[in-house]
Image: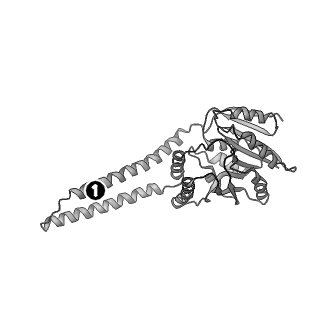
Amino acid sequence: MLVSIVVSVYNEEEVLEKFYNTLRLCIEIPELAFEIIFVNDGSTDASLDVLNNIFNQDERIKIINFSRNFGHESAMLAGIEHSNGDLIICMDSDLQHPPAKIPEIIQKFSEGFEVISMVRKQRDDAGFLGRLTSKYFYRLLNKLSDFKFETNASDFFAISRRVANVVSTNFKDRNRFLRGFIQQVGFRKSTIDYEAPKRAGGSSKYSFYKLLVFSIAVIVANSRTPLRFSIFISFFFGLFSIIVAIYSMVMKLVGNPFSGYTTLIVFMSISFSLLFFVIGVLGEYIGNLYQEIKARPIYIIESIFEHKK
């Protein structure tokens, strides 16, 4: 059996050598063959030089080099599409996805599971805001979406060749959520818990703003509830306007009309705030459609380095 390990790399020169040495020790399983696919996602540091050095040490290494930075999800998808394994394991190169879990993943696959989600139970370097964001992101997504996602599932996961073919062929969204996609395809699924240690080097490439933008994109791509919420807002304010109009006419008929200035200003302020919110929601969905219709490439490969068989 061939196992493909897909590793996303973006400006990780400080940790790549250590990651490779750790990974190499964890996959010394005589009865299995491995290929290790590093996807260099347009790194601007010396990551590619480090990868080339690793490439010269190990014939199992393949390097996919992007023409520029396309994002973590694109890198994982490229690795999946260029893999040959019966089992494909996707992970990051910062050692927060522990390679020591790989034998356990392979065991799950041997038991017949085709989708193995790695569920993070603890993250040593996550601050209060990071833990809070992660906790409520899945809670909100599951409230809004018809499909229930595994809470705290990470970009550390494994899929069979059959699932990989389905994802590569049918999940070509420009706004990608691979850890969610693999949960939606069906087949036998299982989870493995793990604890994410502190980064072995470098710094996180995701700021709070990037995580927020990503979260909004994921919700828009997986739920129509925000659009339905807009309809409920319209109905509520239409009903409220009718009540205010009736009340105003009754007060005028009984000879006790109220000034209405404060009421009018407050009502208009709330109305316009909600109106712009609804327009923003619609804008996100239209922007999503615009990206999909353009159908520009999800990634562009500048070069591929692999050993001749």
Looking at the picture, how far across and down is residue 106, in whole percent? 78, 54
Looking at the picture, how far across and down is residue 308, in whole percent? 82, 33
Is residue 254 toward the left or the right of residue 281 in the image?
left
Vertical placement of residue 14 versus 263, above or below:
above
Residue at x-position 17% and y-position 62%? 258
| Residue type of the residue flagged with mark 1 | Val
Callout 1: SS:
helix
Using the image as rendered, state which of residue 48 and residue 228 is in the foreground.
48
Using the image as rendered, state which of residue 211 and residue 271 is in the foreground.
211
Q: Quadrant of residue 135?
A: bottom right
Vertical placement of residue 1 versus 300, above or below:
below
Looking at the picture, how far across and down is residue 3, in whole percent? 78, 48
Q: Residue furthest bottom?
A: 254
Residue at x-position 77% and y-position 36%? 54
Q: Residue furthest left?
A: 255
Looking at the picture, how far across and down is residue 261, in whole percent? 21, 56
Q: Quadrant of residue 235?
A: bottom left
Crowd class of label 1 (few under 14; some 14 to 19; many from 20; radius 10 Å): few
Residue 91: tell me if it is visible: yes
Residue 117: tell me if it is visible: no
Split into 4 quadrants, where in the image is the C terminus? Answer: top right
Q: Which residue is mark 1?
A: 266
Using the image as rendered, state which of residue 73 and residue 232 is in the foreground.
73
